[in-house]
Image: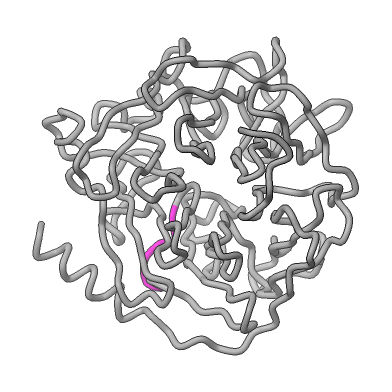
Amino acid sequence: MRAALIALLALIATGAASAEPAKVGKLKPDSAVVFLSGSAGGKDQFGFTPQEIFAAAIDGRDVVQLTFSGYTHNHLAVSPNRRYIASNRYVRGDTTGDGRLAADDFKQMWVIDLETGREWPIAKDMDGGIGGIAWSPDSKWIYFASWTDQAHHTLYQDRMDIYRATVDGRTVQPLTHNLPALMGETDPRKFVSDTAVSHDGKWIAMDYKPAAMLSPTASKARIGLMRVDGSAARVLTDGGPEPPQMRGRFGIGDTDPDFSPDGKRVVFTRSTKLGYVFKGAYHAEGLSTQDLLVVDIDGRNLKNLSPQPNMDTYGVPSWGDNCKILYTLWTDRPKSHRLAQYMNSDGTGVTSIEGLPDDINKVQWLPGLKPDHPC
């Protein structure tokens, strides 16, 4: 196993490429959010409408296109110094042959340099990750989850690890290969994704499933915490009251964690069985309804921030330096569409960002936004 891992990392490191000139947009002085959208139009070489990266002001004005890759991006994260974007692209199209681009299709990790206008792939023979991407506070490391076995895997039923790579891609390190043992498990298999890093760079939060939860019907994700140096690990949440089951394309459980600016709390989403939204878009049944919750890092003070009963899907929350929680809201009311909304950390002050494209997705705060009140 160790020899295979070393060989894999050697192969990954050779994937570092020199930065090639590219058309890259510039952030505007009032840019506050970044997001994905197909509003630029056109088709990629596989016949899909590319989902490029855009930025906008907090009121939805001054929309600027940042990438012109011609590919669909899956997840994105902006470095704390606001210079780089890390994002994974579907550069090989529909690799599973199911007629769409989804989490189990191959994705390649790219770095976009907003200062020089260059972009380059890193770890280019390695799948660019499932779930969220994160940065170290010094903007030198990119964190993402990918398959332990790059050649042979099945979505939700195989092993995944969290890795970190330098901006140039020359160094790639696995971080969670010993996670089950740290969690007190005897089976080394696990599935981790939805990576987040605390603002002090010491902790990783993740969507965590041990070996016993790797089958689709047993899949009940929980939020796990681990120190970056591997010195500690624990389960933070229990996945909620619903029994393990598939709800549309995804399983019941807790996903998409992000840390508060002070590192004392975590925001995440929890799937419920109240209904489905976006029927047929992601799955025949649609996306399961999801609530937005916060919890202290010691597991106390769990609070649901969503209105109850909630018939929408709150997705991929981003807890900004401005102390506000931003998220993408999938809703069928009055018609199927997505909204970018943010709220205070206690659930008050819900605000929709107007004027953005109808197909907005994976909306995230830009780093460095000043708070208008203490967190």
Horizontally, is 8 left or right of 154 in the view? Answer: left
Residue 199: percent from the left, percent from the top? Answer: 46, 47
Q: Quadrant of residue 222?
A: top left
Numbered-mark total = 0
Where is residue 79 drawn, in percent x and y?
A: 54, 62
* Residue 277 lies in quadrant: top right
Residue 145 relative to residue 131: left or right: left
Q: Position of residue 239 (x, y in %)?
A: 43, 20
The residue range painted magenta reads 124-129
- Taken as a whole, is the magenta stretch helix, strand or loop? loop
Front-most of residues 87 and 105? 87
Q: Nearer the viewer, residue 174 or 209?
A: 174
Could you say where residue 123 lies in the image, as x and y percent from the top left?
Answer: 38, 71
Against 318, residue 291 (above or below) is above
Q: Is residue 280 above or below residue 244?
A: below
The residue lying at 78 percent from left, 28 percent from top is: 350
Residue 96 vertical placement versus 244 (above, below): below
Residue depicted at 59% across the width and 70% down the height: 83
What colouring style does the render use?
one colour
Name the residue at 59% across, 83% down: 118
The correct choice, above or below, for 287 with respect to 165 in the image is above
Q: Among all residues in the image, which is located at the extreme front?
A: 374
Residue 225 vs residue 210, the one in the foreground:
225
Q: What residue is shown at x 26% (from left), y 75% (from top)? A: 11
- Quadrant hosting residue 140: bottom left
Q: Considering the image in quadrants, where does the N terminus appear?
A: bottom left
Q: Is residue 127 magenta?
A: yes
User: Which quarter of the rendered picture does the C terminus lie within?
Assistant: top right
Q: Is residue 288 magenta?
A: no
